[in-house]
Image: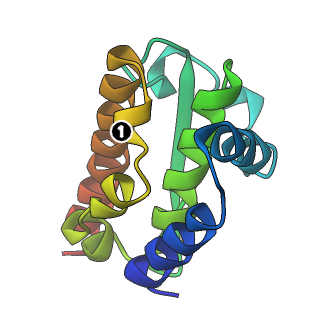
Amino acid sequence: MTIEEVQNQIIEEFSMFEDWEERYQYMIDLGKTLPLIDKKYKNEDHIIKGCQSKVWVHANMEDDKVKFTADSDAIITKGIIAILIRVFSNQHPKAIIEANTEFIDKIGLKEHLSPTRANGLVSMIKQLKLYAIAYQTQLN
């Protein structure tokens, strides 16, 4: 699936819920499906700066696609990074770099986060794209 197809799938899934309490529960459930990061990557080198909670992300290249794993010490944050990894993992670096993140606004996520969590969301996206930039540079 393309990034846009995954984003549209997420928009559709979130539209099925009546209120934000149900959406938060869905995000928590998504966090439980997160491809967990190897414990050796749960260190300062892999922590995302700018998040209120601790969020660790690791990326590696397989078949010219970036694969992400992650973890967080907070359940909502774990759900947020799970959504982002679902969108960006297993995609070509160039597609990740060029991807827009309007789906976040379409599902209403940013407006339902505290300011510190919203800043953390931006930091997560930035870090995932930085990994993609690094891998794209290797491909060139």
* Image vertical order of residue 93 relative to residue 22, above or below: below
Disc 1 element: helix
**Front in this rendered view, residue 131 or 87:** 87
Task: Give the x, y percent position of residue 132.
Answer: 32, 59
Task: Give the x, y percent position of residue 48.
Answer: 42, 25
Residue shown at the point (27%, 47%) measured from the top left: 130
In the figure, is residue 24 to the left or right of 98? right
Please tell me in which quadrant of the rendered image residue 37 appears: top right
* Image vertical order of residue 19 relative to residue 38, above or below: below
Residue shown at the point (53%, 37%) measured from the top left: 57
The quadrant of the rendering that contains the C terminus is bottom left
Please tell me in which quadrant of the rendered image residue 12 appears: bottom right
Mark 1 lies on residue: 110
In the figure, is residue 106 to the left or right of 99? right
Asked whether residue 50 appears in the rendered view, the answer is: no
Residue shown at the point (48%, 22%) measured from the top left: 47
